[in-house]
Amino acid sequence: MPVSDHVNLEQFMEGVKKRNPGQAEFVQAVHEVAQDIFEFMADKVEYHEAQILRRIAEPDRIVSFRVCWEDDNHNIRVQRGWRVQNNNAIGPYKGGIRFHPSVTESVLKFLAFEQTFKNSLTGLPMGGGKGGANFNPKGKSDAEVMRFCQSFMTELYRHIGPDTDVPAGDIGVGGREIGYMFGQYKRITGRWEGVLTGKGQEYGGSQMRPEATGYGAVYFLQNMLKHQGMDVEGHTAVISGSGNVATHAAEKITQLGGKVLTLSDSGGFIHDPDGIDQEKIDWVKNLKNVKRGRISEYADHFTNASFHEGKRPWDVSCDLALPCATQNELNEDEAKTLVDNGVKGVSEGANMPTTLDGVKVFHDAKILYGPGKAANAGGVAVSGLEMSQNSERISWNHERLGEMLTDLMEGIHEKCTEYGDQGDGYVDYVKGANIAGFKKVADAMLAFGVV
Ligand code: NDP
Ligand code: 2IT
């Protein structure tokens, strides 16, 4: 059949919308990828005939389950948990677990879909998956979080394993939660195996994993800037979020001689015109990870800073912007404001933080724009290294892992430029990431036939 007889992008997206009613985030993620892949596939009959994109956009399976737990007042609470196993063509399903009240099947499907391309881009043998629950860890005691994590793992354990599916952290899931879940997996199965990444250093965790996503997002930005003869040094940066990714992105920007002006959480953002240096970043890490406090407290402690309740930081004038909180946190108007204020580069620590209209603004203005699936791939890449270390029963040191992360991010940047170079010196990193990520998975799927 000639390629022209196959469905076009519009028909394809109509089908995706029809099959996934009410799943706006998933449809958005598929649309962003499909735009580039349809163009790439225009003269490639084999991908059309094998319905490759249609198959990648249909998760291999979705497991959903009830998670019951008892709070400290002896109330019985019921949450919903999921694991979306999107695609394992090139390796075991791999991707984080998110605990947040906003978690829905649509959100996890979009994340598992994105993860498939991201993991492919790293060059490591990992398929794509994502899981989570509509549980809100905020305000819960350690004991409540432990009981929830144990109950969640009691359901999840039968669907995962070091060669089948290897979860990790994401929003609301950090070292504490991974510890509780790993402990429960080990208790149920009686096996110590690398079934989760992001583990503590004492029990098989990779030394670089906590820093990897934030550092990697800055390395990706550095690579984009370098490609245009620029650098991070001497530039101001606006960062959203104040969790794992945001604080480590801030740390790396600062180490490279940049000045971080903002951090945020769901309550608002803080603006520190003096710059958020390492000492202040350490204070924020302690606030968030130990005291489990709110970013507004920063402005009470560092009195030159201001807190902007209910606001996002994108109207603070800056050279560099790093959205590191959540999906759709930067819209068309905010993208225009950043461009009007002279932003030079945007690197996404978060997954799909910029809306499709916002991305268009960056592209039209020819701003360096690194999409999450490329820019934040450092986290899962170091997770891949943690899997290797666990399989080989070895442990690489911080320095060695740091070098590997730097190389991996450079490799991802290279792959993006290979497919995204527009010929006029501008690189469309979205297109580059989508095509490079797709090609490896698609070719593996072609090799398997119809399965
Ligand atoms: P954390 O839970 O450590 O931090 C999340 C941060 O984002 C918090 O400051 C949180 O504020 C804020 N946030 C969450 N939801 C919202 C919301 N709806 N509106 C405004 N702010 C919000 O998570 P991570 O730092 O790990 O994850 C941040 C982003 O990075 C996510 O998009 C995640 O998918 C992505 N990512 C994470 C990786 C990792 O290795 N951890 C790897 C690759 C991507 P509050 O405390 O108020 O909720
Ligand atoms: O979105 C992501 O890449 C993650 N949350 C990390 C996944 C992982 O398996 O380390």
Image (spheres, rainbow, N blue to C red):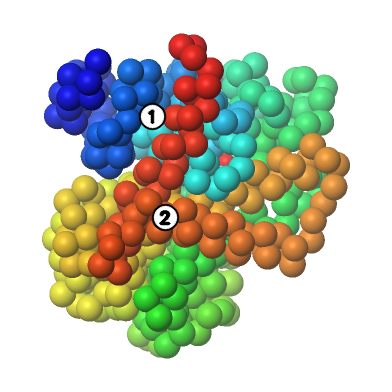
Q: Would you place residue 348 above or below residue 4 in this image?
A: below
Which residue shows up at 28% across the image and 63% down it?
423
Which residue shows up at 81% across the image and 31% down it?
192
Residue 373 image position (x, y, % from top left): 42, 48
Residue behind mark 2: 418
Residue 39 image position (x, y, % from top left): 25, 39
Cβ atoms at labels 2 and 1 below 8 Å apart? no
206 displayed left or right of 370: right
262 displayed left or right of 71: left
Estimate how packed mark 1 is, as few (under 14), some (14 to 19) or many (20 or more) residues with alpha carbons within 10 Å. Answer: many
**Number of numbered labels in the structure image:** 2
Mark 1 falls on what kind of element?
Answer: helix
For marks 2 and 1 on the same chain, the one whose residue lies earlier in the sequence: 1
Tell me the amino acid under the disc marked 1: Lys
Work out whether residue 94 or residue 425 is closer to the camera in this orientation and state it: 425
Q: Would you place residue 315 above or below residue 103 in this image?
A: below
Residue behind mark 1: 109
Work out whether residue 185 or residue 413 is closer to the camera in this orientation and state it: 413
Mark 2 falls on what kind of element?
Answer: helix
Which residue shows up at 17% across the image and 19% down it?
5
Q: Which residue lies furthest to the right in this view?
A: 393
